[in-house]
Amino acid sequence: MVVAALFALPFILNRLGKIGEYWIWVSTEIIISALFASSLNLILGFGGMVSFGHAAFFGVGAYTVALLMKKGGIPLIPALMAAPMMAAIMAAVIGWFCVRLIGLYFAILTLAFGQLLYMIVFQWYNFTGGDDGIHGIPKPALLTPVNYYLFCLVIFLVCFLLMWMIVNSSFGLTIRTIRENMDRAKFIGINVKRFQWFNFIIAGAFAGLAGGLFTELNRFAQTDFLHWSKSAEPILASLVGGMYSLVGPALGTAVLMFLNIFLQQIHQDLIEIWAMILGFILLLVVLFAPDGLVGLYGRIRERIDSFGAI
Amino acid sequence: MTPQFYLFLLVNGLAQGMLLFIIASGLTLVFGVLRIINFAHGSLYMIGAFLAFSLSTVLEEGSLISFMLLLLLVPAALMIVGLALETTLFRRIYDQEHLLQLLLTYALVLILDDTVRVIWGGDIRNVPRPTAFSGSVDLLGLSFPMYNVFILGVGPLIALGLWGLLYRSRAGNLIRAAASYPEMLGALGVNVRMVMTWTFLMGCGLAGVGGVLMAALANIDLGIGMEKIIECFAVVVIGGLGSVWGALLGSLIIGVGISFIQLPLSRLAVVFPYIAMALVLIWRPWGLFGRPER
Amino acid sequence: MEGYVNGSIPLGPFKRGSMDRDQPILQVKDLSKAFNGNMVIHKVHFSITERELSAIIGPNGAGKTTLFNLITGYHLPDRGKILFRGKEIVGMQPYDIVRLGIARAFQRTNIFPRLTVLDNIVSTIITSQRRNLDFFRPVSGRRGVHEKALEILESVGLADLAHQQSGMLAHGNQKRLDIAVALALEPKLLLLDEPTAGMSPEERWRIVKLIQRLWDQLKITMVFIEHDMDIVFGISQKIRVLCYGSLIAEGSPEEISKNERVIEAYLGEEIS
């Protein structure tokens, strides 16, 4: 049912396209961010580990596309295929170190590596353009805003399908098993580190793809893409939407994006304190609804069902 | 690159390390007793630094008394902030999953860091050093900034003070007992909640002291909170969580390391904590003081 | 047969080429472990033969659970060896030790709370079959695995709770699930840490009958830690007694019941 609604969207928006190109752009951004958030949720919701440095892979994907297209003259499609590969390699390296640790230490190390990568990109002026970033990335004429939206939507749906398969596969069950009880998982014969590593790499690859798509959408790549505050977005989206479900992150992304726009309309100043608002939302969610909107929905459904039974 | 130059780097590194210790000790103390890693510890330190700046503008510039006043008022203010945080937030998550604790304190980082930005803006600030400490000291043919020497002196004092508190006073016994045997202590009629709250306040106070000292040492900006918490993490990774001595050793190592790594990698000097962390975590994941219990 | 001995029992280690029945499946040699300076396990030395059903008993704090932790690779001993079917397992990772054939059920239930009862077992089976690196085929499609999982749940009496969230089960059922997870590994040596802890008397006997039935049907070696002496003396073939980290006695239930050192350890006084 949900899938049907998603397919209807492009056609509805196609009409709007003539009126609101802005909304097309926003929707495309939501889709890309939803991909980013879903990728993180593989680690967070399904893996049970907090990664504060996921933006690193987003950024690697973004800069890969930017550099390949701008400086290498490579067309979009190959660049977009390279993005997740580069991100996966980076995730393999970083992940190898990080999965040696559990819980808190894992989170700290992901943060550290994320910042490390941020600083390297920041300082490496000759290659990455440092603080200026890389601008003027070519866009093929074929990709009008509407077409690019559809392009991203298709890619997102394909990725979503892949993630669905992975989560429901034996690998996915094993990852969830590790999340539930890491010690016991070892005692049923699971090589926990190895599985967490693979999961980390897969998540990184999807994030890289999202980064590449994002860069092409905006036609620039910026150091901000790797900053720790960028890493916060998917965490929030996953929590708000519901980290134990596959659609949660996408839902959360949409909600937060709409909230952002809504606040902008109400009062320009409110956007100035967006980080603070996000912090408060996170606080409330963690304290009162850790399973997010999807979880809430589930609980409300249960209550209604139990009423109906009477 | 004379040996004197290395000595200079060493002393400066030790000073930085001492400052880091003051802050990291608060973090590790809070973890030892409350079993919460307060991600927002760096943000508290940053608030302390900026608060020091604001107060310094209304106090007499350069006077030693003003500086002492800062060292008293700012930690006190932070303790009040800490009290608010502990009673409203931290209490609710003592027994929660670590994942949620992490996310909660992370939410605090977002809120507090942005609050600092809103109140103080994005400009670089600093606190003028007291004139008593503003010159240099000549030792062994080298000129050391007096302020650095001051920190080098204050650090061990605080370390000693902490040691005295923890190992030689009744309050300290309570704190250490609460870290190891909270239920037992509760059964003996001790108000463990109080101990936990006070420990948290102490942690905030230490962050405040660190903030004041740092504001007079170097320029402060909006990034120092995150920078410092990562350094603190490196410290506790190296020294082991919950160990004050470990925090001392870890801080000195990080401080000296950052100082020396300026030579080969000047622009990336700040990466030293990360490299150190990664190395320790790969080679001895249980910290330099732990044992491989698996 | 010797009664109480603070050393090895020549039950099988030196017989070569004889019946499989009497070969040692597990040999613990001079095992020692200290935590923070406290000697928790001190020079423990014994052999378990294949298909033995034995109990480990001892006053609280005697080190029984630590012994299980050492055997399963959760801790590293300070000194000594552990041989599983002749192979040295000290230093191996827990997951490798599991793959060799040692499984364990825990004292405090240690299951996977948000997974369903069935998934707890399914996950274990696909792991032990080494099929868990499959990224694409949905687990629900694996009929064979699901059938097997249901069989195992049947054998412990949990089949009708298969789709419940395991974290919501009553304590007794969680314990059964814990045992079922260990069984799903098709172990050759099953270690049960206080399988009846926290249960009502009738539940206890049901679990005991379950253990006996499983031992009978599966013909595996089982060792359990227990405090309930009726159970211990009721079903075990052999009893080993730990006290303050040392093995103070080893023998048949009859021998142990008459063993003075054992009585002293539990009652702390001499029986005249």
Image (cartoon, rainbow, N blue to C red):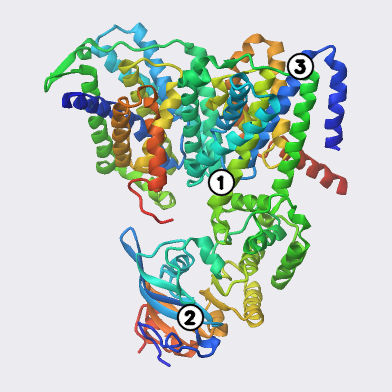
Left of B182 or right of it: where is C222? right
Percent coordinates x, y for residue B34 in the rendering: 44, 41
Mark 1 and mark 3 lie on one chain; the one further toward the N terminus is 3
- Residue A141's label in the rendered image is 3
Of residues A11 and A37, which is closer to you in this image? A11
Secondary structure at numbered mark 1 = helix
Q: Give neighbour class at mark 2: few <14, some 14-19, many 20+ (Cα, 10 Å).
A: many
Residue matched to label 2: C48
Chain for mark 3? A
Q: Chain of mark 2?
A: C
The chain to which mark 1 is attached is A
User: How far apart, in angstroms, are the residues tagged by discs 1 and 3?
Assistant: 40 Å
- The residue positioned 56% from the left and 77% from the top of the image is C222
Q: Amino acid at mark 2?
A: Ile
- Same chain for mark 2 and mark 1? The answer is no
As drawn, the label of residue A197 is 1
- Residue type at mark 1: give it: Trp
Say which quadrant the N terminus of chain C sits in: bottom left
Is residue C181 or residue B90 the one in the foreground? C181
Residue depth check, mark 3 versus mark 2: number of the one nearer the observer: 3
Residue that appears at 71% across and 11% down: A266
Instruction: Identify whether C258 is placed above or below B206.
Output: below
- Alpha carbon distance from label 3 to label 2: 76 Å
Q: Amino acid at mark 3?
A: Ala
